[in-house]
Amino acid sequence: MRLYKIRSIMLRDMMILKKSKIRFIESFYFPITTVLIWGLFSLYSKAFSLEAGMLVLAVNILWSFAYLAQSVTNILIMEDVWSDSFKQVILTGVSQFEYLTARILVSILNSVAVLAIMLGMAYYIFGMTIIAENFAGILMLSAVTITGSIGLAVIISAMIIGLGREYAFLSWSAMQLFVFFSLPFIPLAAAPQVLQYISQIMPYTAVFEGARAIVTTGSVPPPALYKGFAIAAAYIIVSLPFYRHIFERARRNGNLVRLA
């Protein structure tokens, strides 16, 4: 891959994010208000259950982080489609992986910056001291989250390229389903049997399990981290050849032109 091509697309995307009010709202407004909403709930819940409020806040922070890390990649691609600039970008000689890598890197920079803001708010405004007490665990859970989100973003990108622009809704809707099956607020054993089987292969099940453990026990169980990294890495390993296959097939059968 050519770094100058990736850098050029990244600079273009950052300029779009900076100038677009809609992108600013999606990237900062919703995550920040999410922290405020559930942070206030955690303050209220101290009267009867401190752990419950902190658990909900911790899960929502990682949920917002996961959504940003995935959706920004896919929405930037859809921006090219909606603005009819997809064809022009591809005609510059950018390869399919250079095109995708630039979007993933911009998404990582954007989502990590927002995560830092959310964690800072949770610590300084709402007294979520477990962030400082187990910062290494938070970082590990964040790494698992962003790894799984990248794999999911690649899969969704391939699906949109293969199925067409009318499936753009997957950019912002797919995450909800994956989070649901990852059981964010309940332990695996408390879920119906069918959900237990499905959650085993979800990229965020171990992340939410680790978040709940940090709140309740003060540490992340190593098995949850190992399992989380393994599943998140599997998503990336599967997603890359899938993306390449779909992209090349779309180029051959004309779907790529119709997308542009």
Image: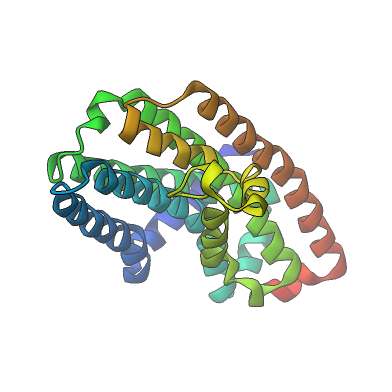
Using the rendered image of the protein, determine whether residue 187 is visible from the camera's viewpoint.
Answer: yes
In this picture, residue 260 sits left or right of residue 179: right
Residue 231, above or below 242: above
Q: Residue 253, relative to residue 99: is it above or below? A: below
* Residue beneath the point at 27% across and 47% down: 118
Q: Name above or below for residue 26 compared with residue 165.
A: above
Above or below, 90 relative to 113:
below
Q: Is residue 155 left or right of residue 246?
A: left
171, 205: nearer the viewer: 205
72 left or right of 131 in image: right
Q: Position of residue 105 (x, y in %)?
A: 49, 44
Residue 146 in the image, given as x and y percentages of width and height = 49, 41
Q: Is residue 110 visible?
A: no
> In which quadrant will I find the C terminus?
bottom right
The residue lying at 13 percent from left, 49 percent from top is 47
All told, the count of numbered labels is 0
Q: Quadrant of the N terminus?
A: top right
Q: Is residue 13 left or right of residue 96?
A: left
- For image coordinates 61% across by 61% down, the residue present is 89
Which residue is situated farthest in the right direction here?
253
Q: In the image shown, does 176 or 22 lie closer to the viewer?
A: 176
How was this image coloured? rainbow
Q: Residue at x 31, y 26 (%)?
A: 218
How far across and how far down the image is residue 30, in percent? 31, 62
